[in-house]
Amino acid sequence: MNSNGCARDMIDEENARFEGITSRHKDSKGGLIPILHEVQELYGYLPDSAFVRISKTCNIPLSEIYGVATFYSFFSLKPKGKYEISVCMGTACYVKGAGRILDRIREELDIDVGDCTEDGKFSLSACRCLGACGLAPVIKVNEQVHGRLALADVSEVLNQYE
Ligand code: FES
């Protein structure tokens, strides 16, 4: 099979999964949140096109879908990188210079909070206390925690990720 055939198969499979998700939940009360969860699992984030399709298929106003998706922090409207960097901006980390760490990461990767690098490798977010205040300032890369981070350590930490 040629590469176009493969791409078409993937799109067909995604479409089938998308339809399965909406048909499973569209008639249940409060079905929008599970739909958004599962669609986010499917694409890795919630693209605008998914909002339009959910709205049409489930007969839910776009404004309501957008309102729910932006209210809950676990929904992402932008693609995530292979490595998701969360910089803790809780009080302990903030006092120990988390703002400067965040700025350094933004400079190193040339992206802003909420964005993803062009190669899809890293995405960057700021978060609340990660529960490791004794290690402040703390960042998390996917599930790996890096604590007592100095500005000079930022490059080295980022370089650990291939
Ligand atoms: S404030 Fe950063 S881990 Fe608690």
Image: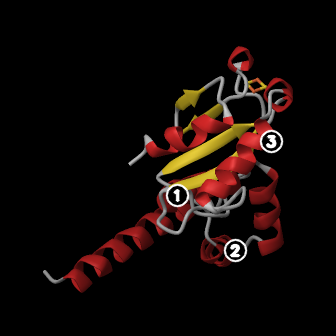
Q: Is residue 125 above or below residue 131?
A: below
Q: In the drawing, what numbered circle is on residue 44? A: 1
Colour style of the rendered protein structure = secondary structure
* Disc 1 from disc 2: Cα separation: 19 Å
Q: Please state the horizontal and vertical placement of residue 44, each as a whole percent of the image.
A: 52, 58
Q: Secondary structure at mark 1?
A: loop
Q: In the drawing, what numbered circle is on residue 99? A: 3
Q: Which residue is mark 2?
A: 55
Indicate the quadrant where residue 137 lies.
top right
Q: Any atom of ligand 1 within 8 Å of the CB at mark 1? A: no
Mark 1 or 3: the one toward you? 3
Residue at coordinates 60% horizontally, 44% vertically from top-left?
85
Q: Please state the horizontal and vertical placement of residue 99, each as a whole percent of the image.
A: 80, 41
- The kind of residue on which mark 1 rests is Gly
Q: Secondary structure at mark 3?
A: helix
- Of residues 27 and 109, the one nearer the viewer is 109
Give the position of the N terminus as an image quadrant: bottom left
First in sequence, mark 1 or 2: give its number: 1
- The kind of residue on which mark 3 rests is Gly
First in sequence, mark 1 or 3: give its number: 1
Q: Are marks 2 and 3 in contact (CB under 8 Å)?
A: no
In the shown orientation, is residue 40 left or right of residue 115? left
Indicate the quadrant where residue 126 lies.
top right
* Disc 1 from disc 3: Cα separation: 27 Å
Q: Is residue 80 above or below residue 84?
A: below
For ligand 1, give the image quadrant.
top right
* Disc 2 from disc 3: Cα separation: 39 Å
Report crowding for label 1: few under 14, some 14 to 19, many 20 or more residues within 10 A (C-alpha). Answer: some
Tally of marks: 3
